[in-house]
Amino acid sequence: MKKIILALVTVFVFTSCDQQKIAFIDNGELINDYQGKIDIEAKFKVKDSLFKKDTDSIGMAFQKEVKNYQMNGAKMSTKKRQETEQQLGQKQQMLQQQIQMQQQAMQQEFQVAIDSALVKVKDFVTDYGKKNNYTYILGKNEAGSVMYGSDTNDITKEVTEALNATYTK
């Protein structure tokens, strides 16, 4: 009987020592403070600014053509006026489509870059958890996957610092 009790106590001691290491990360904070994402946003802000300048200059050139037509339209024959109006209408439509296609391509390029950054963050957190012997690293977000966590279990800052350190290399 003593051997059974001793065996049970030994098993209990060993199983109770096998603590699971659990922490959480504030997903939004981690992503927003990730230098890779910050750089992507800065790059696309510059691209967007250049895109707006290009579209403004194209628009101004087109407006110049329209103004020129309005000034000289009265001197044209009815047939020539109709042809010019049709050409201007087609040109306007073509310019709008071109601008819209460029804008969609830029948005798609941005989304691909952001998605790639999110995959890098996810992979990094997985590796970080394995290297630091975490059983679980939970994600805290607005949806409430972690409603409460002790600050001692919040590893957001240290993971963000480690992630940014690997990014700058």
Image (cartoon, rainbow, N blue to C red):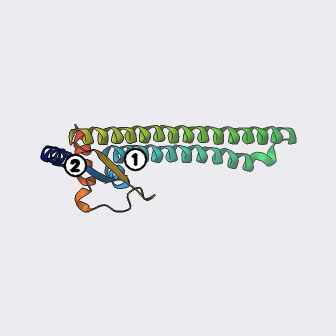
Percent coordinates x, y for residue 128 in the rendering:
25, 41
Q: Residues within 10 Å of mark 1 (few under 14, many from 20)?
A: some
Decide: is 149 above or below 36. Answer: below
Q: Quadrant of the C terminus?
A: top left
Percent coordinates x, y for residue 30 in the rendering:
33, 51
N-terminal label among 2 and 1? 2
* Element class at badge 2: loop
The CA span between labels 2 and 1 is 41 Å
Q: Residue at x 41, y 45 (%)?
A: 46
Q: Residues within 10 Å of mark 2 (few under 14, many from 20)?
A: few
Q: Residue at x 86, y 38 (%)?
A: 79
* Element class at badge 1: helix
Comparing 43 with 6, the one in front is 6
Q: Which of the 4 image quarters holds residue 61? A: top right
**Mark 2 is on which residue type?**
Gln
Q: Residue at x 30, y 42 (%)?
A: 125
Left or right for 134, reference 144 = left
Which residue is under mark 1? 41
Comparing 154 with 31, the one in front is 154
**Mark 1 is on which residue type?**
Glu
Q: Residue at x 77, y 39 (%)?
A: 84
Front tag of 2 and 1: 2
Percent coordinates x, y for residue 151 in the rendering:
25, 61
Left or right for 155, reference 84 = left
Which mark, residue 19?
2
Left or right for 155, reference 101 = left
Instruction: Evaluate whether residue 121 shows in this view.
Output: yes
Q: Which of the 4 image quarters holds residue 44? A: top left
